[in-house]
Image: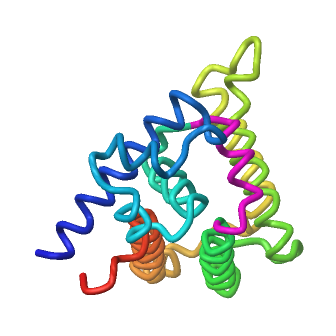
Amino acid sequence: MASARHAQRAERILDAAAELVLRWGYKRVTIEDVAKRAGIGKGTVYLHFSTRAALFVAVLIRESLAMVSRDIDVLGDLAHEAAIEPLRALKTDFAGELFALLRAHGLLRTDLDIDTQRYVLDAVQTGFYLAEPLMAMPARPHAAADALTHTIRLAVQSPQPPDPDTLAGLAPKVIAMYEQFRGALATAALGDPPEGE
């Protein structure tokens, strides 16, 4: 019951922070503003999130999970915060484990190193999400999806067709890895539980 209260309160804090960031921008929102909007005390915010940066990184994690916010200013400012390092490490570790597993079973090309493949995928993914608002004539959804598929295939797909038995055998493990990663992101979005909860 205490953890349910913690999660509900954290969600209220994150809702308030996200709303205020959209209204005023990342640089203008204070912890006091967030607390007032959430209807709680400033100290309660700090029970959930140790710093202002940690709070806004949590907002970013939550929003990216839902693919709701593409606010370039927030992303740019938060990308330089030290509080985002645990998220980067989580993502790097996950990608390294996943790529190593798929490469070991012949499902990813091995003529490029894992770091290069990750870089290409991150750059393509970021560009895919951020390009449309900047383009005068965005691509039709199917054309954009085809272009993205082609680029990703060139960067990571093994030149040999995948073995169906290998795919079937690895599918449950890969799904479990993604579920664990998603759970870790969702937990990080709620912040650290206060002492005693």
Left/right placement of residue 182 relative to residue 133 reads left
**Relative to 197, is 175 above or below?**
above
Residue displayed at 68% across by 25% down: 132
Residue at the extreme left: 1
Q: Tell me the residue at 23%/59% (across/down).
A: 8
Q: Total label count?
A: 0
Q: Quadrant of residue 168?
A: bottom left
The image shows residue 47 at horizontal and vertical percentages of 38, 71
Work out whether residue 62 or residue 91 is closer to the camera in this orientation and state it: 62
**Residue lying furthest top in this view?**
136
Q: How is the image coloured?
A: rainbow
The quadrant in which the N terminus is found is bottom left
Q: Is residue 78 visible?
A: yes
Which segment is the magenta one?
70-83
Magenta span has 170? no
Task: Give the vertical position of 157 relative to 13 (above or below).
Answer: below
Residue 89 in the image: state x and y as whole percent.
Answer: 66, 77
- Residue 107 seen from this side: no
Kindly report the secondary structure that dominates the magenta region of the rendered protein.
helix
Viewer-nearest residue: 14 or 133: 14
Q: Is residue 172 above or below residue 14?
A: below
- Image quadrant occupied by the C terminus: bottom left
